[in-house]
Image (cartoon, rainbow, N blue to C red):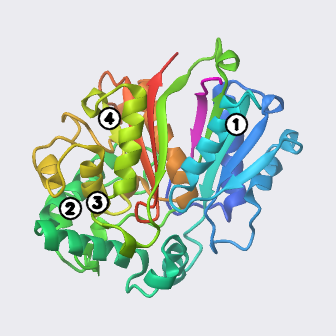
Amino acid sequence: MSDPMIIGWAHTPFGRLEEPGVEQLIARVAGSALDHAGIAASSVDGIFAGVFNAGFSRQSFDAALVALALPELAHVPATRLENACATGSAALFGALDFIASGRGRIALVVGAEKMTATPTAEVGEILLSACYRPEEAATDGGFAGLFGQIAAGYFERYGDRSVELAMIAAKNHKNGVANPFAQMRKDLGFEFCNAISDRNPFVAPPLRRTDCSLISDGAAALVIAAPDAATGLARAIGFRSRAHANDHFPLSRRDPHAFEGARRAWTAALAEAGLVLDDLDLVETHDCFTVAELIEYEAMGLAAPGEGYRVVRDGVTALGGRLPVNPSGGLKARGHPIGATGISQQVMACLQLMGDAGDMQVPGASLAGVFNMGGAAVSNYVSILERRA
């Protein structure tokens, strides 16, 4: 078994992009990532593509699109992976397993999504593909409605935490100002995020517009290498550990406010790494909705159940706090093009570990945690990254 490493990456801005589809978004990052790694396309042994699609495009079979950008890859084995909002992590973990097994030395991982060309009402319907349709597809407000129900149930059990959700939104938007890739680079401030207004209405009560991530286009890519293939290259980010845990698909068959699958993934990753949470310098976590970030504080072990509000109130997760969470702005400000998100989170962590995060930089960052989830914490991926070169 070899220990795979990230040796290069590329990332488009997220937002409403001019590229008409996933093919062009993939083309924007595939070659750039190889150039960044200092690797020729002829050295790639496997391609792993993450695209959710589920109706965003009539074109599927997305793994084959990578070679349209780089004809040298036409005969390289290519596979598409999909796991709802954790699609990017599924592609990455597939590549890591490919390298760790010894079946290849270099893998190219690409995640992309084109969402803004689809009417908003259809976007909501497409995203419901990530819920358990027999029980949840009729939820008012689509996937936001599903998380609205989670938030309402959490509030009923632990008390109204709307103020703390607004604090999370304000924190992530403030962080996103410094991220050149972010879709929304505007410090909205706590007062705006906390108030109900024409510009910040309820989307799925108690969730407001500022509690919900954005509809986004974008792509990101990583180059993964076996240790011998990374020797002498400009950068190498290693995986101190990684873990993947699932939970029951229907919310009716589990406690929807506990994110048990996320807790299991974090527990396994920290145990494998021989670390405790306080050893980490930062975390990039999956804030598709602010209530998700709040519950993830509890799942990762920052707070006991129902006590996540203390984390944000005490400034623990702010830049300069004990454990900065989403210094990139998270999905809330950076954007959430489904297939690209899990890979984007890794790129954000790599920038931190290389000291290349600019105004987002967490000083002295040497260990970074990444959490990416599919659906309402159904499929949960955690990786702990450290710089090797």
Residue under numbered circle 4: 282
Q: Callout 1: helix, strand or loop?
A: helix
* In-image side of 143 versus 237 (left or right): left
On screen, 94 above or below 87?
A: above
Name the residue rendered at 41%, 45% in the picture: 265
The span shown in magenta is 1-13
Which quadrant of the view contains residue 95?
top right
Residue type at mark 3 is: Ala
Image x and y of residue 292, in percent:
31, 60
Q: Callout 3: helix, strand or loop?
A: loop
Image x and y of residue 129, in percent:
55, 74
Rounded to the nearest angstrom, the CA distance separating label 1 from label 4 is 28 Å
Rounded to the nearest angstrom, the CA distance separating label 2 from label 4 is 20 Å
Residue under numbered circle 1: 98
Residue type at mark 4 is: Leu
Mark 4 crowd level (few <14, some 14–19, many ≥20, 10 Å Cα): many
Image x and y of residue 315, in percent:
14, 43
If you read the primary sequence from the N terminus, does the residue marked by circle 2 or circle 3 appear first? 2
213 inside magenta stretch = no
